Image (tube, rainbow, N blue to C red):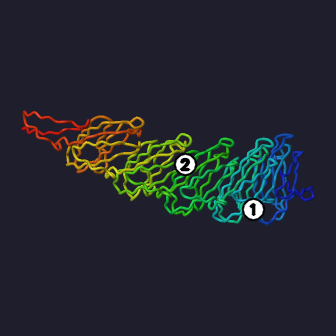
């Protein structure tokens, strides 16, 4: 049983923030301490059993007001939070729970509302410190404003005794507990009132002592954030496991933002960058762990913040990321339909932006192929988005892609390094399949000789037809300029749907349906080579430019090219 300790029992004065060690040497013994405080303070006592001398030893701490009233009590290892009311002095009494044993103890006293001996915590900077006792509390204060969202990140750096992991307790200036982290981890807290936060670093579960690194940052308006430009590629590094590098990006309401991230090097530990995007109020919009991409709508915000940190504070290293607006890409080059464009992806996360004018209902062909590798293993891919930022197509590496435009007056086309594994140069072609740009007009029965001089090039032709005509295309590869050259002939209807396709030498027969015009495109199979070709197109239900062949008549003629078709018609009866 605890008897209220009188002044005559030999009370020891202690100060706020002090760590005290002592022992109970008789089962009914009580050690008392006095602590001067201010009215309405919130007192925090952190207690730990150090050793057992006799019996079933469990230390018990009791806090009394100046009139002897019990304000709070805790048995065993843990934390005791006590509002002191109008008292100006409290007594802290240590004893054995249920008078059941004797042993050693350690405790530390601190104030929750206005931490004693607190160091000023600079926003956005890493500070280092030491927890020298298992109940020790290293106190800091961080200036804030109501409505702030704050991240508090702590990680142990060395162990001095026992098993040490650092954790943080965060309280507001009124002593309300607003956050507790797990060992060696980050926490986010919301400031509802007051002008500062108390941040106290302790040993998780009071099991050891050691050193730590600590960082705090404001998520709603990050301190020292670097200003990003849309389309910019950033290279940076995390040099301390608790550090977070912040960036701010001006956006328009309802923009769609794309972030492409890649870890470039590992300095220590298991390095995996975590990328997090926050709105103007500090709310998390989304994020990504390690290599990859994420797409986010920014809502009504005019600015977003991007933070890069290490996953679980487990390592340090370098990173690269690129940020782009995908509903209306920044710094876009106009992509001309039917014309070959060359470019370079200069960084593994780089996005080379283009815009192509379109109309709803267009069927587009996008063809990309890498031409040279500058670093790593480079293959080019294309990502196609509409003017609202919706992805409507993504190609495989070094290949073509067909997409349908459902709305808008332009599409955004981004050329990227496949899997973020290298950099290099590329060629890109865009073509409208329902109304090919710069198409050559064909005549029925015509033989065409031409060549493909770039692996992504496609030569297009248009042919006027009658509904329900039947077409015959006869194709031949005439010469190889580079690679493994095999021509592909593709026939499309008036709205860009593929009617049929032929690879290399051969014949293709097609019904044209209700169409009045068809398009024929010649390209390289799998973008694997360049070379010459020849083809002839003919209508086989009513051949064009036909000579009349009389029954029983012998005529002579010439097939002037390898795909040519010399047409005749002979009158018959059913």
Q: Where is residue 121 in the image (x, y as percent from the top left)?
A: 74, 59
Tell me: residue 561, above or below residue 328. above
The residue depicted at 47 percent of the width and 51 percent of the height is 414
Tell me: residue 319, above or below residue 486. below
Q: In this view, does 73 lie to the left or right of 504?
A: right
**Residue 568 appears in which quarter of the rendering?**
top left
Mark 1 = which residue?
A: 113
The residue depicted at 55 percent of the width and 54 percent of the height is 323
Q: Where is residue 480 in the image (x, y as percent from the top left)?
A: 38, 36
Q: Position of residue 565 (x, y in %)?
A: 21, 38
Which numbered marker is on residue 247?
none
* Quadrant of image for the C terminus: top left
Q: Please tell me which residue lies in front, 326 or 369.
A: 369
Mark 2 = which residue?
A: 346
Circle 1 or circle 2, nearest the eye: 2
Q: Is residue 287 left or right of residue 357?
A: right
Tell me: residue 92, above or below residue 319. below
Q: Please tell me which residue lies in front, 115 or 75.
A: 115
Q: Please tell me which residue lies in front, 272 or 495.
A: 495
Label 2 sits on a secondary structure element that is loop
Label 1 sits on a secondary structure element that is loop
Q: Please tell me which residue lies in front, 158 or 320.
A: 320
Q: Position of residue 107 (x, y in %)?
A: 82, 51
The residue depicted at 60 percent of the width and 45 percent of the height is 263
CA gap, disc 1 and disc 2: 53 Å
The residue depicted at 60 percent of the width and 52 percent of the height is 234
Q: Earlier in the sequence, mark 1 or mark 2?
A: 1
């Amino acid at each position: 049983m605890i008897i209220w300790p009188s002044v005559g029992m030999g009370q020891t004065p202690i100060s706020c923030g002090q760590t005290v060690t002592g022992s109970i040497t008789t089962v009914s013994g009580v050690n008392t301490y006095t602590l001067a405080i201010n009215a309405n303070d919130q007192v925090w006592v952190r207690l730990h059993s150090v050793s057992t001398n006799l019996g079933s030893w469990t230390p018990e701490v009791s806090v009394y007001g100046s009139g002897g009233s019990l304000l709070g009590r805790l048995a065993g290892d843990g934390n005791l939070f006590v509002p002191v009311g109008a008292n100006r002095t409290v007594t802290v009494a240590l004893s054995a729970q249920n008078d059941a044993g004797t042993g050693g103890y350690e405790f530390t006293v601190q104030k929750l509302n206005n931490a004693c001996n607190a160091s000023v915590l600079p926003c956005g900077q890493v500070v280092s410190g030491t927890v020298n006792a298992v109940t020790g509390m290293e106190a800091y204060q961080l200036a804030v404003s109501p409505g702030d969202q704050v991240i508090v990140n702590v990680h142990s750096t060395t162990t001095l005794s026992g098993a040490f992991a650092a954790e943080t307790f965060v309280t507001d200036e009124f002593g309300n507990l607003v956050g507790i982290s797990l060992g060696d981890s980050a926490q986010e807290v919301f400031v509802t009132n007051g002008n500062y936060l108390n941040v106290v670093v302790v040993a998780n579960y009071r099991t050891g002592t050691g050193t730590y690194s600590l960082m705090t940052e404001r998520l709603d308006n990050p301190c020292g954030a670097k200003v990003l430009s849309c389309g910019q590629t950033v290279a940076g590094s995390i040099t301390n496991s608790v550090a977070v590098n912040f960036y701010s990006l001006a956006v328009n309401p309802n923009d769609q933002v794309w972030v492409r991230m890649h870890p470039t090097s590992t300095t220590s530990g298991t390095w995996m960058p975590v990328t997090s995007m926050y709105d103007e109020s500090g709310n998390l919009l989304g994020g990504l762990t390690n290599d990859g991409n994420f797409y986010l709508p920014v809502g009504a915000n005019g600015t977003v913040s991007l933070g890069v940190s290490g996953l679980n504070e487990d390592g340090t290293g370098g990173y690269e990321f690129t940020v782009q607006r995908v509903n209306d890409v920044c710094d876009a080059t106009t992509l001309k339909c039917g014309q070959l464009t060359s470019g370079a992806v200069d960084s593994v996360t780089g996005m080379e932006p283009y815009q192509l004018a379109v109309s709803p209902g267009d069927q587009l062909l996008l063809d990309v192929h890498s031409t040279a590798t500058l670093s790593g293993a480079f293959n080019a891919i294309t990502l196609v988005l509409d003017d609202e930022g919706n992805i409507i197509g993504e190609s495989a590496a070094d290949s073509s892609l067909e997409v349908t435009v459902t709305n808008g007056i332009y599409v955004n086309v981004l050329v990227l390094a496949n899997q973020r594994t290298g950099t290099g140069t590329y060629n890109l072609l865009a073509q409208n399949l329902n109304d090919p740009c710069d198409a050559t007009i064909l005549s029925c029965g015509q033989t065409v000789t031409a060549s493909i001089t770039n692996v992504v090039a496609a030569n297009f032709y248009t042919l006027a037809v009658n509904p329900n005509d039947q077409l015959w295309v006869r194709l031949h590869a005439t010469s190889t300029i580079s690679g493994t050259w095999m021509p592909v002939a593709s026939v499309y209807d008036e709205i860009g749907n593929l009617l049929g396709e032929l690879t290399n030498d051969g014949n293709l027969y097609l019904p044209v349906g209700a169409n009045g015009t068809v398009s024929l495109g010649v390209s390289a199979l799998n973008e694997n080579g360049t070379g010459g070709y020849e083809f002839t197109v003919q209508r086989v239900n009513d051949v064009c430019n036909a000579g009349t062949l009389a029954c029983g008549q012998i005529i002579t003629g010439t097939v002037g090219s390898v795909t040519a078709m010399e047409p005749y018609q002979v009158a018959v009866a059913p």
